[in-house]
Image (tube, helix red, strand yellow):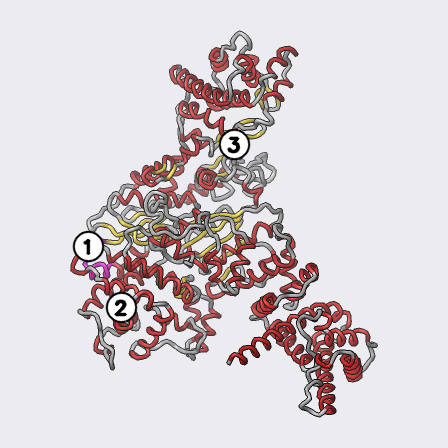
């Protein structure tokens, strides 16, 4: 089966992708994921680097480790993959005489795969240092070894014949550090350059590799203009005779969906002037542009971006906000007082357009057929009983929709228009039945008069069904809008949101060649201070740089009426504020996530912000976008199953149902044309999880797993937080691979840092999956995972490693069965992994194993026997210790315990006493050996357990009695299984 990353790349590559590149992804990429995913190309923890460098006898281990750890994380996997794809993409621009042959394409792939072989060597546990540039035989050996590990054979049968060419490219990718470019130095022994023209190893191959390697070290789009790396990239272009220059755009802010929309709109806009993207960052992109290219106008960009945001892009199959507004999916919310409209809705459409769209909105939002509002309103009206009975006969959902249309239209467009009520009554032929004054009857902020009008219309037209009412409202809205336009009753709408957006782009969008707009900090500070003094709305999600408004439940996803410390104490303001920019972001989340306005917070969302590790190539950007677009809810029962089926290897996670369409096989070019927009790329991708549970633990169990698994499988960086606002504008603002902001209490109990470097990721993921597996196996009842009790499970595991076995025994006793050999092996491995790095836990595991070995010398039973039979020696020893007088001398306690244990053994069958049944030894000697073994075991129990671990405290020993016995039972079963497997193996020989 393919890996997750492999599947995503295969499906998003165009159908006409070169077979060589496709073969590389199918053959070498899975091996690279296995070998390179946890090796740091850049970044990593200081401690991890220091320990490896010390093992390799590096004299400057401390200084080097500090320097390396001060860089942001990037795995060798994505370093190589993005470097290769960037070099490959660039090769398409080579002039005809430098175009690559098939052999050269394969050399390009394999050369860049091994170009950081030194980091691959340093990432191993062995104490070997990578060879120096002059040590050609050693370099060739390293390259051949890694070629075998990385499945080069499946990619290219002839790769060993080109080993020297591959090693030369790998060693000389960088033009400064560690180069050895004299071909004659390499042709030693039987090795010689295989390529027909060895000059092509330098041009074009070395220059292509160098471009790819330099590119994946960039951390910001502007690096191509302000860093030396940009100069070096331009030099490579010139050397390769590619008549292009590097330009960029970046956005110095990150909101989420809004900023991604801006990025994609800019990419689409500059495509028209032949700027071709070659690198994607979290905050922008780098392009190859014609040499005479000039910067586009900021006004043109702003217009294009706004149109894309509102109207979408039909050519890219992207819907705009207007599509969602017009159907009522976004910008409208309905509560007990009727429909409410977001201010942005009124800004995006002219009043006449909006009136004509209201019937569709009413149809979508007013759907309370089982409990219509009209009967309740009619009952409260002070009208004649006969009239009331007549109206109640047709007071149903049909009347609700007509009433809410009339109320909303009046409130938003005709509030001060005296002609509105008479005109409506005339259009409904009710002017003789109801007076305009009667339409104004209100109670509790709800207009009851229009409900009476709607009920009266339905009473006169009772044969109309819901569809016919919808058709009637569509025609009625058109006539109403036409009447209002002809009589000049509709106000010209303005768009403060558009003005704020224009200001936002001017301040934050940076495009190559455009003059940077100054930041308006003074105005921002003055606006904030003025709002404080005058008790005006202040955005609770950002500073006061853009005009705010009250948070409305038709806009925000969370509860709007909550205290904010940005509001003045003692003031009358209840609602928090929100800026126009953040309002746009909230509406986009409503639209693209189908997130309910004002209610998402009830489901305790945790947001995952997914950043590239420095940079994406276009191919990896599309792959990540596909996953975030189709990512489905993780079933942690299935996560546990796949992980355990893969023998606790991360490879099992590749085959999870990550996406809604994972049942299908990966198909080449599946999303290359119409189904998937190749322009709608993630930059900083984001998604979120929700829970039906009520605790913070319920909310965090799934996103915590995703935050650790996605970097491991895709090489990305992830920030998980309950904050609506991304914590970082770019991945360069934090060094770590994973950031967990405000995680639930179980994370701290796991003993893990909330910020994880790449080389700490595997340990964290293993500990998390062990805790999940133990909890789901023993303290849940499928389908209820009972995550609210998970903190207790983790606390037990963190307290004592033997609780791994004690918790396992809970479910075994409940099910009234003994553990299978597979379960014994699994829980023993759980405990071994869990104890790694904790000296006390490691000692306890070793001591438990040694303790059982000691009593297995004189007492052994079959695993079919009961737990009581298996634990007879340890049970008897603990019983003697706990029941003995406090003043009993330790030596006397040992002798007393040994005697009672011997008496207990005398009542057992001889075949359970291995020393006594060995007839090759004299019987008296056998008895002596057994007594000595029993005495040694009892000495260990008294001296090391009772007096050592528990300081002679019988109460403490009693409290831990079941843990000791649980650990001893699993150790006994595990040792028995190991001995049986060993004897079978020897028998087969």
Viewer-proximal residue among 129 and 350: 129
**How many labels, in total?**
3
Give me the residue at 72% from left, 78% from top.
Answer: 941
Where disc 3 sits, the SS reads strand
Q: Quadrant of residue 975?
A: bottom right
Give me the residue at 28% from left, 61% from top.
Answer: 211
Distance between mark 2 and mark 1 Cα atoms: 21 Å
Distance between mark 3 and mark 1 Cα atoms: 54 Å
Distance between mark 2 and mark 3 Cα atoms: 61 Å
State left or right for residue 110 relative to residue 889. Answer: left
- Image vertical order of residue 783 relative to residue 37, above or below: above
Q: Is residue 243 covered in magenta?
A: yes
Q: Quadrant of residue 505?
A: top left
State which tag comes first along the sequence, 3 or 1: 1
Picture coordinates of residue 853 (x, y %)?
65, 79
State which tag comes first along the sequence, 2 or 3: 2
Where disc 1 sits, the SS reads loop
**Residue to which mark 3 is pinned:** 333
**Residue to which mark 1 is pinned:** 243
Task: Identify the magenta region.
Answer: 234-244
Q: Nearer the viewer, mark 2 or mark 3?
A: 3
**Residue to which mark 2 is pinned:** 175
Picture coordinates of residue 151 (x, y %)?
36, 67
Viewer-proximal residue among 91 and 220: 91
User: Is disc 1 surrounded by few (<14), some (14 to 19) or many (20+) residues within 10 Å?
Assistant: some
């Amino acid at each position: 089966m393919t890996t997750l990353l492999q599947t995503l790349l295969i499906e998003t590559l165009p159908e006409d992708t070169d077979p060589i590149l496709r073969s590389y992804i199918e053959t070498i990429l899975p091996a690279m994921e296995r070998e390179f995913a946890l090796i740091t190309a850049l970044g990593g923890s200081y401690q991890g680097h220091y320990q490896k460098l010390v093992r390799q006898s590096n004299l400057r281990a401390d200084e080097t480790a500090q320097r390396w750890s001060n860089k942001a994380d990037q795995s060798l996997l994505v370093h190589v993959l993005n470097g290769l794809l960037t070099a490959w993409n660039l090769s398409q621009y080579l002039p005809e005489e430098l175009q690559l042959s098939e052999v050269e394409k394969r050399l390009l792939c394999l050369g860049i795969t091994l170009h950081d072989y030194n980091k691959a060597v340093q990432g191993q546990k062995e104490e070997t240092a990578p060879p120096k540039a002059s040590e050609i035989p050693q370099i060739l050996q390293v390259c051949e070894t890694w070629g075998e590990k990385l499945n080069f054979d499946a990619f290219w049968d002839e790769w060993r014949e080109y080993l020297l060419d591959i090693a030369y490219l790998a060693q000389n990718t960088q033009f400064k550090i560690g180069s050895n470019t004299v071909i004659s130095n390499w042709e030693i022994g039987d090795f010689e350059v295989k390529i027909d023209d060895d000059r092509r190893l330098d041009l074009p191959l070395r220059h292509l590799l160098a471009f790819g390697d330099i590119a994946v070290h960039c951390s910001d789009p502007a690096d191509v203009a302000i860093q030396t790396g940009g100069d070096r990239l331009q030099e490579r272009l010139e050397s390769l005779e590619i008549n292009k220059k590097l330009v960029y755009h970046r956005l110095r802010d990150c909101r989420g969906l809004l900023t991604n929309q801006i990025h994609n709109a800019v990419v689409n806009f500059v495509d028209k002037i032949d700027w071709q993207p070659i690198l994607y960052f979290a905050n922008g992109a780098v392009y190859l542009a014609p040499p005479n290219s000039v910067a586009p106008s900021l006004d043109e960009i702003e217009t294009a971006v706004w149109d894309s945001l509102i109207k979408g892009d039909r050519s890219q199959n992207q819907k705009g906000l207007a599509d969602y507004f017009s159907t009522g999916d976004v910008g409208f919310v309905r509560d007990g007082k009727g429909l409410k409209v977001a201010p942005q809705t009124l800004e995006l459409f002219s009043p006449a357009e909006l009136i004509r769209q209201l019937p569709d909105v009413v149809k979508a939002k007013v759907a309370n057929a089982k409990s219509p509002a009209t009967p309740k309103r009619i009952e409260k009206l002070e009208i004649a009983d006969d009239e009331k009975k007549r109206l109640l006969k047709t007071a149903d959902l049909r009347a609700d929709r007509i009433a809410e249309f009339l109320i909303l239209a009046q409130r938003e467009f005709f509030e001060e228009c005296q002609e509105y009520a008479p005109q409506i009554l005339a259009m409904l032929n009710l002017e003789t039945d109801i007076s305009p004054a009667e339409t104004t009857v209100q109670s509790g902020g709800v207009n009851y008069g229009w409900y009476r009008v709607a009920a009266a219309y339905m009473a006169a037209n009772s044969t109309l069904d819901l569809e016919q009412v919808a058709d009637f409202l569509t025609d009625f809205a058109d006539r109403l809008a036409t009447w209002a336009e002809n009589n000049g009753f509709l106000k010209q709408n303005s768009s403060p949101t558009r003005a704020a957006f224009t200001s936002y782009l001017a301040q934050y969008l940076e495009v190559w060649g455009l003059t940077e707009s100054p930041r308006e900090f003074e105005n921002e500070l003055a606006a904030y201070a003025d709002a404080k003094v005058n008790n005006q709305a202040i955005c609770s999600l950002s500073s006061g740089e853009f005009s705010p408004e009250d948070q409305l439940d038709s806009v925000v996803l969370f509860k709007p009426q909550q205290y904010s410390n940005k509001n003045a104490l003692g003031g009358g303001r209840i609602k928090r504020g929100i800026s126009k920019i953040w309002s746009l972001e909230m509406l986009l989340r409503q639209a693209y996530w189908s997130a309910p306005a004002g209610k998402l917070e009830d489901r305790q969302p945790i947001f995952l912000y997914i950043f590239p590790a420095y940079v994406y190539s276009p191919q990896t950007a599309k792959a990540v976008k596909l996953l975030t677009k189709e990512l489905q809810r993780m079933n942690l029962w299935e996560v546990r199953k796949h992980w355990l089926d893969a023998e606790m290897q991360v490879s099992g996670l590749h085959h999870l149902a990550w996406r809604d369409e994972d049942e299908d096989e990966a198909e080449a070019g599946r999303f290359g044309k119409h189904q998937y927009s190749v322009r709608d790329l993630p930059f900083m991708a984001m998604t979120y999880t929700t829970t039906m549970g009520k605790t913070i633990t319920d909310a965090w169990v799934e996103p915590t797993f995703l935050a650790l698994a996605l970097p491991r499988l895709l090489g990305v960086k992830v920030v998980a937080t309950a904050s609506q606002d991304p914590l970082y504008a770019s991945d360069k603002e934090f060094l770590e691979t994973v950031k967990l902001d405000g995680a639930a209490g179980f994370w701290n109990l796991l003993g893990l840092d909330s910020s994880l470097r790449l080389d700490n990721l595997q340990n964290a993921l293993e500990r998390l999956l062990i805790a999940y597996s133990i909890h789901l196996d023993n303290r849940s009842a499928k389908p209820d995972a009972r995550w609210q009790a998970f903190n207790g499970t983790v606390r037990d595991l963190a307290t004592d490693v033997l609780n791994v076995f004690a918790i396992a025994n809970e479910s075994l006793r409940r099910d009234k069965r003994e553990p299978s050999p597979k379960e014994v092996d699994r829980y023993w491995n759980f405990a071994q992994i869990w104890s790694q790095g904790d000296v006390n836990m490691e000692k306890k595991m070793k001591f438990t194993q040694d303790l059982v070995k000691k009593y297995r010398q004189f007492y052994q039973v079959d695993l079919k026997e009961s737990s009581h039979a298996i634990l007879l020696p340890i049970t008897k020893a603990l019983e003697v210790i706990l029941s003995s007088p406090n003043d009993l001398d330790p030596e006397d306690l040992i002798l007393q315990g040994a005697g009672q244990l011997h008496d207990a053994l005398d009542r057992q069958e001889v075949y359970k006493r291995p020393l006594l049944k060995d007839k090759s030894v004299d019987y008296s000697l056998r008895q002596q050996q057994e007594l000595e073994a029993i005495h040694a075991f009892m000495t260990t129990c008294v001296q090391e357990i009772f007096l050592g671990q528990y300081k002679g405290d019988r109460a403490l020993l009693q409290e831990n009695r079941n843990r000791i016995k649980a650990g001893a039972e699993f150790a006994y079963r595990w040792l028995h299984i190991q001995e049986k497997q060993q004897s079978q193996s020897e028998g087969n020989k």
